[in-house]
Image: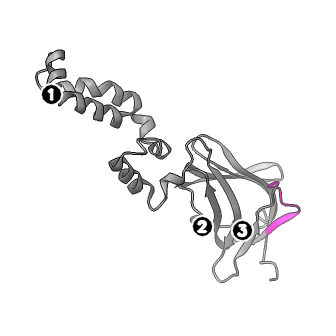
Amino acid sequence: MWLCTLRIGIHFLKDPGFRAFAGLRDPFDDLCCVVLKGYLDDLIDCVKPAVATELGKDDESLRKWKEQLLGSVDVTNIGETLDPEVKIISLAILSPGRPDIVLMVPENGNPKGMWFTLKEGSKYCLKFTFQVKNNIVSGLRYTNTVWKTGVKVDRGKEMLGTFSPQSEPYNHVMPEETTPSGMFARGSYSARTKFLDDDNKCYLEINYSFDIRKEWPAV
């Protein structure tokens, strides 16, 4: 890691005996030679938050740096080899002037029957509630594909972000959207939603059906 390489380089360059043995003159010029290769080799990996937890756990300055990076997370409780665990607790549909439609996620990720109904031409947004355990999940994102009578009619994705493990669930609200309207927009749809990280690990895949009608269903 570049930070470790930098510390080692500085340590030896401060030592007069080492500098005389190596024939070094200007410590700053030679430092570049010592550090550059390791810096370039490891730069990409060391900027990832997960790698930050591996750097010098006993080093006080690195500990403070990790705390700044990870916020209030207790980095000593983050596993060294454990994969992150992300559980999507619920999805909710928020529409102005309407009670929230809270959709609990089945264990198998496949709700039975029609999962929900939307009114045509209505504004709404999605809210995800999820929990992260074991380790940091990097680049968590949401993808959604919609079909009508077997034809793909919509595909969307949203970057949720990078999250550290904590006991309290996270909430993420998507940008507002408007349902399509008109005779051809009404009817039944099928959809597939996925939650993946930047390694394309899928934490949940939901296959479901919904419909669009002239009016909201009775509450």
Residue located 60% across and 67% down the image: 168
Labelled disc at residue 27: 1
Left or right for 11, reference 43: left
The residue that appears at 63% across and 80% down in the rendered structure is 96
Q: Secondary structure at mark 3?
A: loop
Mark 2 and mark 1: Cα distance apart in space: 49 Å
Tell me if mark 1 has few (under 14), some (14-19) or many (20+) residues whose alpha carbon lies within 10 angstroms of its own. some
Depth order, front residue of 10/15: 15
Q: Nearer the viewer, mark 3 or mark 2?
A: 2
- The residue where tag 2 is placed is 168
Q: CA distance from mark 3 to mark 2?
A: 38 Å
- Quarter of the image for residue 102 reads bottom right
Residue 146 is at least partly visible in this image: no
Residue 188 % position (x, y):
83, 61
Q: Magenta residues?
A: 108-116
Q: Position of residue 118 (x, y in %)?
A: 75, 71
Callout 2 amino acid: Glu
Q: Main secondary structure of the magenta part?
A: loop
Precedes in sequence: disc 3 or disc 2: 2
What is the C-alpha distance between the residues marked 1 and 3? 70 Å
Q: Which residue is mark 3?
A: 181
Q: Secondary structure at mark 1?
A: helix
Q: Residue at x 34, y 37 (%)?
A: 3
Q: Amino acid at mark 3?
A: Ser
Expressed as whole percent of the image width and height from the top left, the position of residue 86 reads 65, 54
Q: Which mark is residue 120?
A: none
